[in-house]
Image (cartoon, rainbow, N blue to C red):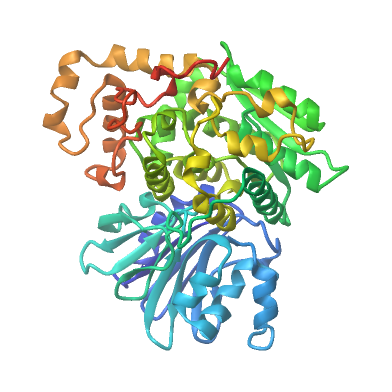
């Protein structure tokens, strides 16, 4: 991951600008550079992944454009071939293609040509305007705001970089670009133009083929690569696919669990043994969890319950990876449940409701699971890559007959499981195991410890009066009040960055619960055992 700051204003001196940019330094500790182009200030914190030389350092500058981009452009070699007669490249960085691509095709077509995870800001010196764009899923973060005195636009990889510069700060919407005046939707990943009703075999073959391609794209890096392995279906599939694509190469896999009942560790070890990976386990304690809480909330820039719970283990795992290895790139298994279903989507009343819920979850990924993965990984100077968020894969899965993805089989995510059954990817017991939610699977004691801590700090009366402090999305438990109080310390008045608590669909029978954990659902069953 990298971090950037771009301000279309001369309102701030260089010291103030650099102090704000410094808040992104964990995302890019390798090199930092600032430049001024006309009235625009650019700053970039680099994590060197592609072209490790100084040539790959940003901002990229040409006669008429200056660019900063936090991204991986997976089709950059094809784009480079297209542009070879139009532009003399100075590096082998994938992001350098954006300047000639913009120059040749313009902003709208450029964004639609990218097979990528990206957030960029570009200054067009000829048109004297700043433009910006973000990938359709929102894998790479970006916020925008308006400067405190002059109300001029600014962009940052994280909201915290803008806090001292802007009063109004907003998440940059995924799948949009800013054309210098307005925000324009160029792609909605949840919306497909045509639904398909293939046979079961055709559907599973397509799922397998697209996911394998999604993993393969993400193996290209000039820096060393590792893998998060929880032992659940999604991360295990990513590791098994990578292992098949690189026969003879030993993957480096990592897992974390509580010191009490770490459910996932035994399954992660089983997968690692099956694949023959170089596997490392880390153990965390109650003190580790509580000690990391404030740092995690500051890193996440959220108050959402399940996002914070699930982030603590991931954050501590990535911290250990950063401190004990030379890895720079991490592949992870996020973004599967949104398309194939959670435990609560077993209660979807019909196929239309299932598809509608899936569309909602895909559109909101940038606020929840994608936010968690990005912040936990990048705050520890690593780059996360998410094969399940591959745009071709998402489009294919979202276009499948939703009735096929519903749980008619007494087995969640059956279609995904069967896509890899009998293919020697994973043992059957792993492929068919019901997965616990990550915050539970690292050990039920993690959530229990957080609740006990909140219970000791707050009274029932505090919760009853929470609406007097927080009218927007009022905390409804002691735990949620704890998280909101910490969030407001760091980001006062900015709660609207998050639309709501991540919760099951309360309109569905069986889903009107007061906790986001699947443990409270009556169909939890063997999950997490």
Count of numbered circles in the view:
0
Does residue 275 appear left or right of residue 85 in this picture? right
Quarter-wise, where is residue 183 in the image? bottom left
**Image position, residue 401 (x, y; %):** 50, 48
* Residue 12 in view, yes or no: no
Q: Nearer the viewer, residue 500 or 317?
A: 500
Q: Residue drawn 51% across and 45% down?
A: 374
**Image position, residue 199 (x, y; %):** 62, 47
Q: Nearer the viewer, residue 4 or 528?
A: 528
**Image position, residue 270 (x, y; %):** 74, 23
**Residue 109 drawn above or below residue 56:** below
**Image position, residue 274 (x, y; %):** 79, 28
* Residue 200 in view, yes or no: yes
Q: Nearer the viewer, residue 250 or 291?
A: 250
Does residue 158 appear left or right of residue 513 in this picture? right
Q: Residue drawn 26% across and 63% down?
A: 146
**Residue 134 drawn above or below residue 159:** below
Q: Residue drawn 65% across and 32% down?
A: 229
Quarter holding the C terminus is: top right
**Residue 261 drawn above or below residue 28:** above
Q: Nearer the viewer, residue 339 or 230?
A: 339
């Amino acid at each position: 991951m990298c971090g950037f700051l771009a301000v279309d204003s001369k309102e701030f001196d260089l010291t103030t600008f650099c102090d704000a940019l410094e808040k992104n330094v964990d995302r890019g500790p390798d090199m930092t550079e600032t430049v001024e182009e006309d009235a625009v200030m650019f700053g970039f914190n680099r994590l060197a992944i592609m072209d490790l030389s100084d040539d790959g350092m940003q901002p990229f500058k040409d006669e008429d454009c200056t660019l900063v981009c936090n991204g991986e452009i997976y089709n950059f070699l094809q784009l480079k071939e297209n542009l070879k007669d139009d532009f003399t490249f100075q590096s082998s960085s994938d992001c350098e293609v954006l300047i000639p691509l913009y120059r040749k095709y313009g902003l709208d077509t450029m964004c639609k040509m990218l097979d990528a995870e990206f957030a960029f800001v570009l200054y067009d010196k000829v048109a004297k305007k700043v433009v910006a764009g973000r990938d359709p899923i929102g894998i790479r973060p970006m916020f925008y705001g308006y400067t405190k005195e002059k109300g001029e636009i600014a962009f940052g990889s994280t909201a915290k970089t803008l806090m001292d510069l802007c009063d109004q700060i907003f998440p940059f919407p995924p799948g949009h670009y800013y054309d210098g005046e307005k925000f324009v939707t160029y792609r909605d990943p949840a919306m497909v133009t045509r639904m398909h009703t293939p046979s079961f075999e055709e559907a599973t073959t397509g799922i397998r083929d697209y996911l394998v391609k999604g993993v393969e794209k993400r193996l290209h890096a000039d820096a060393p690569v590792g893998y998060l392995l929880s032992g659940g279906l999604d991360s295990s599939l990513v590791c098994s696919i990578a292992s098949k694509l690189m026969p003879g190469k030993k993957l480096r896999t990592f897992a974390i669990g509580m010191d009490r009942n770490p459910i996932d560790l035994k399954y992660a070890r089983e997968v690692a043994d099956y694949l023959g990976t170089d596997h490392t386990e880390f153990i965390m304690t109650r003190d580790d969890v509580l000690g990391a809480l404030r740092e995690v909330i500051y890193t996440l820039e959220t108050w959402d319950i399940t996002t914070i719970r699930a982030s603590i283990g991931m954050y501590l795992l990535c911290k250990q990876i950063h401190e004990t290895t030379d890895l720079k790139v991490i592949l992870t298994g996020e973004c599967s449940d949104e398309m194939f279903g959670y435990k609560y989507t077993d209660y979807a009343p019909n196929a239309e409701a299932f598809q509608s819920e899936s569309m909602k979850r895909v559109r909101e990924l940038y606020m929840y699971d994608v936010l968690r993965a990005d912040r936990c990984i990048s705050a520890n100077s690593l780059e996360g890559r998410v094969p399940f968020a591959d745009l071709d894969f998402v489009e294919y899965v979202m276009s499948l007959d939703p009735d096929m993805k519903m749980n008619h089989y007494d087995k969640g995510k059956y279609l995904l499981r069967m896509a890899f059954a009998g293919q020697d990817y994973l043992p059957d017991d792993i492929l068919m195991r019901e997965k616990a939610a990550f915050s539970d699977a690292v050990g039920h004691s993690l959530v229990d410890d957080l609740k006990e801590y909140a219970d000791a700090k707050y009274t029932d009366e505090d919760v009853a009066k929470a609406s007097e402090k927080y009218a927007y999305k009022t905390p409804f438990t002691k735990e949620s009040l704890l998280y909101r109080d910490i969030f407001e310390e760091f980001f006062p008045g900015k709660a609207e960055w998050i639309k709501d608590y991540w919760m099951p669909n309360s309109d569905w029978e069986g889903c009107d619960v007061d906790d986001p954990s699947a443990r409270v659902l009556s169909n939890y069953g063997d999950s997490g055992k």
